[in-house]
Image (cartoon, rainbow, N blue to C red):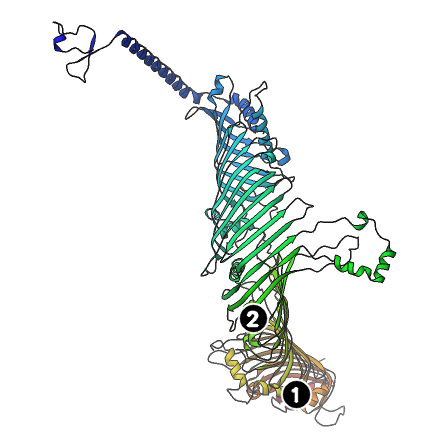
Amino acid sequence: MNCKGPERTAAGNCPITTEHDPLSTGHCTLFTDETMTEDAQVGHRRRKLVWLGLAASAVLLVILVAAPLVSLNRYKSRITHLMSASLGRPVHLSSVELRMLPRPGFVLSDLTVEEDPAYGAEPVLHASTVTASIRLLSLLTGQLEISRISVDDASLNLVRASAGEWNLDPLFRTAAAKAGVGGGGQHRAVPLPYLEATNSRINIKSGAEKLPYSLVDTDLSFWQEQPGVWRIRLRGQPARTDVIVQGADTGVVRLEGSIHRAPELRQMPVHLDLDWRDAQLGQLARLLIGSDPGWRGDLTAELHLDGTPEAAQMKTRLRATGVHRAEFAPAAPMDFDANCALVYHYSTHAVEGLVCDSPLGDGHARLVGEMPASGSQRKFSVELNRIPVAAGLDALRTVRSGFGPGLEASGSISGKISYAEAVPEKSAPEKTGAKPAAVHTAMARSGKGRAATLKSQPTGPLSGSFTVEGFRLSGAGLREPVLIPKLTLEPAYTAAAGRLANGAQPPAAAPTLTSTVTVPAGVQVPLTVVTRLELSGYHVSVRGQASLARARELSHLAGMGDAASLDALAGEAVSVDLNADGPWMESERIPLAGVAAPNSSIESGPAASPVTPADRLSGTVTLRNANWKADFLANHVEIQQATLHLDNFGTGDTSGFRWDPVVFTYGPVKGTATIILPAGCPPAQPCPTRFAVQFGALDAAALQAAILGAHEKGTLLSELIQRLSPSNPAPSWPELEGTIKADSLTLGPATLEKPTATLRILNTGAEITDLDAALLGGRVHGAGTVSTGDAKHTRPEYALTGTFEKLSPAAMGDLLGQHWTGGVLDADGKVELTGFTGADLAASAKGTLHFEWRRGTMLQGTSDQDDSPARFERWTGDAVIAGGKIVLGENRMLKAGRTRSLNGSMQLELPPKFTFAVPEGKPAKR
C-alpha cells in the first residue's frame, strides 16, 4: 500500500515497512513478509550462481594455464585405439596435444589411416594436423568419445577394386555395425564422429594404379544425422595430374546426399544431388581425354539419385551453351539441353528405362534404351523429328578442326532407328540333335533347303531408317550448290558365311547405316556416292566422272592438300575412284599406366600421347587430254594421261600424293614422269616434291628448240631464268628432288647412252649430285650446279666436274676426225660456263682437264709405221679450257723410251677441230 502526507507519523514515517519508489513522487511501496521471502531466495540463487561461475572460471583458468604443460602422449595409444574403433582402420599418430578452446579436444600430428590390404598399401587418409573434439557428455559416464574430427590440407584415396567394391564399403559396414551395438548388448555403441575436411585433395585409384583424376580444394563433411542415417556434403574442383589444366575452368562439383544403414554398401538407401557447374568445354575435354580438341563453350551437368545402388533411379540434365571451335565463332553457336532418366543396377551394371530427350533447333531428338545384364537382349532406339542438317554440320565443325568453315547446309532429318542385340542361341545339336550329313546333302540337291537358308540369313540388329529431305550444300567456293532432294540412311549388313576353322561362329558385322546417291558433277555421267556410317567413324566412296571445274571445287571442299595444283589444269572430264574414312573425333589418348603421383614432380604435358588414326583418303583420279600451266613454267605442258594415286593420304605418310604415270609433251620433248607430292611433313623441316622423269631418245637440237627457241635474249629459256631469279616477283620454282633418265641423248656428234642424272632444283638454281652415262665406248660420271644469277647478272652460270673412264680411242678419233687406236683413255676435269646459247657457253668456258692414254696411236692419215711420231706407249698431260678452245699444257708422251711433248688445241665448235704437232723428244730418264 502507499501512504501519503496525512498518513505519516509525527516522525515522518509510514506506519508500516515501506520503500520509497523513486518513480512516484511522495509515495512509498509496501513489502509484505511473502515479498521479503522471495527476494531472499532470488538473492541466494544469484550468489550461488556467482560462486559457481567464479569456480568454473578458476578451474578453466587453471586448465588453460596447465594445459600446455600437460603431455598426453601417454594417452596416445588410447586415442589411437578409439579412432581405429570409430573408423574401422588402423590409425597411427606421432603426437597428441590438449586443446580447450573453442571446445575441448586433441590436436593430433601426422595422422595416418591405413588401408585395407584388399584395396592396396597406400594409406586411405593422411593429414599433417588433425583436431579431434571431445564429446563432453561422454566424460560424465567415465568414457572418452570423439565428437568431431577436423582435418585441413589432407589427402584421401578412393579405391575401386577389380571386383567393383570401393574401399569405403567396409567403413560403412563397420559404422553400421557399431551403430547397431548397444541397444540390447552389453556395450554402448561407439558413434561415428563428425568428419570434416577443408582445402583437401581426393585421389581416385583403380586397384593399385593411381588414376590422374582428382578433386582439389575440396571441402568434405560426413556425419551421422541420426542412428543409421549418414549425411555427406562435398565441394571441390576436378583436376588432372599428368597435364596442365586450368583449375578454375574445369568447374565446381557440389554433392549433397544421405545414406541409410544396411549390411552392405550396395543395399544402402541413397539420396544424392550432384551438380557440375561453370565448366569450360575445352578444359573439360582436356581433363577427360588429356588434350584440348579445340572445343569452346559452357557446360552444366546435374544428377539426382534415389534408391539403392542395386536399384538407383537417376535423373540427369546436361546443358551446353555457346558451343563452337576455338578458331572461329559461328553466327549461331550450337546449344543443347538433354534430360535423361534411368534405373541403374550396380551389381549387374544394367540400365533399365533409359529415356533421353533434347530439343535441337526446330526439331527434337529422343533416345530410349534397355541395357539388362549380360546374356540378355539390349535394345535402343533413336528418333529424330525434323532435326536441321545445319545442326549436324555444326556438330562436325565443333568436333573436327578445319571441316568446311565456309559451308552452308539446309534440309532436315527425320526417322527412327532401332537396335536389338541378338541373343546367342544354342547350336542345333544341343537342341534337337545334329542331322546326318547325308540328309543335308539330299536337301541341298533337292533344293528344299534353299528357301530355308535364305530365310535364316541374319538381318542384323538394326531396323528402321533416317530420311534427309531438301539437302542443299553451298558456299566454300562452290559455284553451284550440291542438291539432293531425298537421301535415305538404312541399315546394311554383310552376313559372314560359314564357320571358322575351329567351328565357332564368325564375328558379326558392326551395325552400319548406308546411303547411295547420285550427284551431278558437270558431265552426263554423275558421281555415285556411297556413305557408310558407324559408331566409330565413317566411310565414303565416290566413283564416276566429273568436269575439271567441278572436280577442283569438290577437292577444295574435301580439304585435299594438293587441290591448288588442279587449278592450273584444263581439259576433259576426269575419272574418280576415291575412298575416304576416319573417326568422328580426333583426339589424343593419355596412357594411365605409370602416371606419377600427385605430390611427385612431373613435366608439363604427357610423356607420350599416341594420336587416334586421322582421316584416310585413298583411290585414283585420272586425267586425259589436259593442259597444265604452272606459274613457274613459261609454257604449257600437254598431258595425254595422268593418274593421281592417293595412298592412305592423311595417315602421316609423306608420300600421300603420287602422280604415276604422267604422259606429257613439252614442245618437241615427250616423256613419262612420276611425281610424289609430300603430305603430312613435320613442321620446320624441308619437304621437297620428288620426281622421276623418263625420256626416250633425246636430241640436243630438239632440246635446244624446246628450251632456247631463237638464239636471242628474250627467248623461252631467258624468260624461264628470269622467273627463277630471286629478284623477280614472279612465283619461283618449288623445291624438287628427283632423277632424269633417257634412252639416249645426242650431243652433236656424240651420244650419251642411258644417261641418268639426280637433280635438286631450288628457287635459285639446281644441283646435279650424280650424272652417269655411257659415252664413246666408256662411261662418264659427273656433278655440278646451275645458278640463275642475281639482279645484275641474269645469265645462268654452270659449274661442272666430270670423270671419263675407259673411253674408246676409235670413237674419240671419229668424233675429232682422226684415226686413233690403242688402249682406253681416262680423263677428269672441271669447267665453268655462262650464257644461254652454245656460242655463249663455248666462249665463256673456263676450266682444266687431265688425261691419260696408254699404248695408243694417233694418226691423221692411214700410216701406222713403227717410227711414226704418233705411236706411243703412254701419254699423260693437262689441258686448259679458255677462249673457246682446249689447249694442251704440260704433257708427256713416252715413245720408244723417249719422252716427248705435244702442242695442240681443239676448238669448241661444231664440228670440233683438233690440231697438234710433235717436237723432237729427249731420251727418257732411266
Q: Amino acid at mark 2?
A: Leu
Q: Which residue is mark 1?
A: 902
Residue 817 found in image quarter: bottom right
State the residue lying farthest toward the right.
Answer: 438
> Which residue position holds label 2?
554
- At mark 1, the secondary structure is loop
In the rendered image, residue 613, in percent from the top left (x then y), is placed at 61, 58
Viewer-closest of 168 and 319: 319
In the picture, which quadrant includes the C terminus? bottom right
In the rendered view, does 335 fall on the left or right side of 41? Answer: right
x, y percentage for residue 374?
68, 45
**Image location (x, y in percent) of residue 392:** 53, 60
Q: Is residue 810 visible in this depiction of the protein? A: yes
Q: Is residue 823 above or below residue 438?
A: below
Q: Nearer the viewer, residue 721 or 662?
A: 662
Q: Quadrant of residue 30?
A: top left
2 or 1: tag closer to the N-terminus: 2
Q: Which residue is at the front of the view, 745 or 850?
A: 745
Q: Foreground mark, 2 or 1?
A: 2
Q: Gap in Å between the C-alphas at discs 2 and 1? A: 72 Å
Mark 2–mark 1 contact, CB under 8 Å? Answer: no
